[in-house]
Amino acid sequence: MSDRTGPAVTVIALLLLLLALMVLGWRARRRRQRALPEPPRPPAGLGAPALEVDVLYVATTTAGEPLDRLTVRPLGFRGRAAARVHDAGLVLAIDGEREVLVPADRITGSGLATYAIDRVVEEGGLVAVTWILDEAAGTAVDTYLRVIDPREKTALVDALQRIPRLAHDDDNEGK
């Protein structure tokens, strides 16, 4: 054996140990979050969106905790996505996953953010949407999106900020 075999075996063993710890950590996180429901699917016949933007879906985290990733399917992994704003809410179409509807009446806010999980960008480089995942438990979450064309970021934030008013205005009609 050469003088490099021992260090190479040690490095490989450490990498395998780190991989095993990451898998165990992910499984433990999924167990802790198993009571959380999956987000709703968009209804059939939703119609054309008011706005559609290509984004990178970064993560969904516990509200106010940008480093606490949720593992709820299909929100557990990041990927390319389309964000479509409808009167009914925000539809996220993450590549390789089923579509998710963030219902209008569950959106509590939106704005800009700088970091979430493993993504740190320029000041205000992420769009953050705060919404209620589990109505029964009142579980609030933040969903982070990175708009691919920076010129569309303002339009997305503006459209998202109009959604809650539309939902609440509909609730108050005729009262």
Image (tube, grey):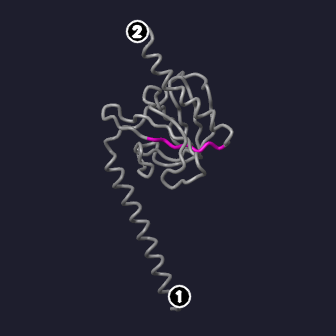
Report the magenta residues as a range.
142-148
Which residue occupies the extreme front position in the image? Answer: 123
Which residue occupies the extreme top position in the image? Answer: 174
How many labels sit on residues?
2
Residue at x-position 60% and y-position 51%: 122
Q: Secondary structure at mark 2?
A: loop
Q: Is residue 146 magenta?
A: yes
Left or right of residue 94, residue 68 in this image:
left
Q: Which residue is mark 1?
A: 4
- Image location (x, y in percent) of residue 166: 51, 21
Which residue type carries mark 2? Lys
Binning the other alpha carbons within 10 Å of mark 2 as few (below 14), some (14 to 19) or many (20 upward) gives few
Q: Secondary structure at mark 1?
A: loop
- Image location (x, y in percent) of residue 88: 50, 24
- Image location (x, y in percent) of residue 140: 39, 38
Query: What's the magenta bit mostly, secondary-structure-wise?
Result: strand
Binning the other alpha carbons within 10 Å of mark 1 as few (below 14), some (14 to 19) or many (20 upward) gives few
- Image location (x, y in percent) of residue 147: 62, 42
The tag on residue 122 is none
Which residue type carries mark 1? Arg
Q: Are marks 2 and 1 in contact (CB under 8 Å)?
A: no
The tag on residue 175 is 2
- Toward the viewer: 79 or 126? 126
For residue 12, above or below residue 1: above
- Toward the viewer: 87 or 100? 87
Dividing the image into 4 quarters, which one contains the C terminus?
top left
Question: Mark 2 to mark 1: distance in Å?
Answer: 78 Å
Q: Is residue 96 magenta?
A: no
Residue at x-position 45% and y-position 11%: 173
Nearest to N terminus: mark 2 or mark 1: 1
For residue 105, above or below residue 126: above
* Quadrant in the picture for residue 22: bottom left
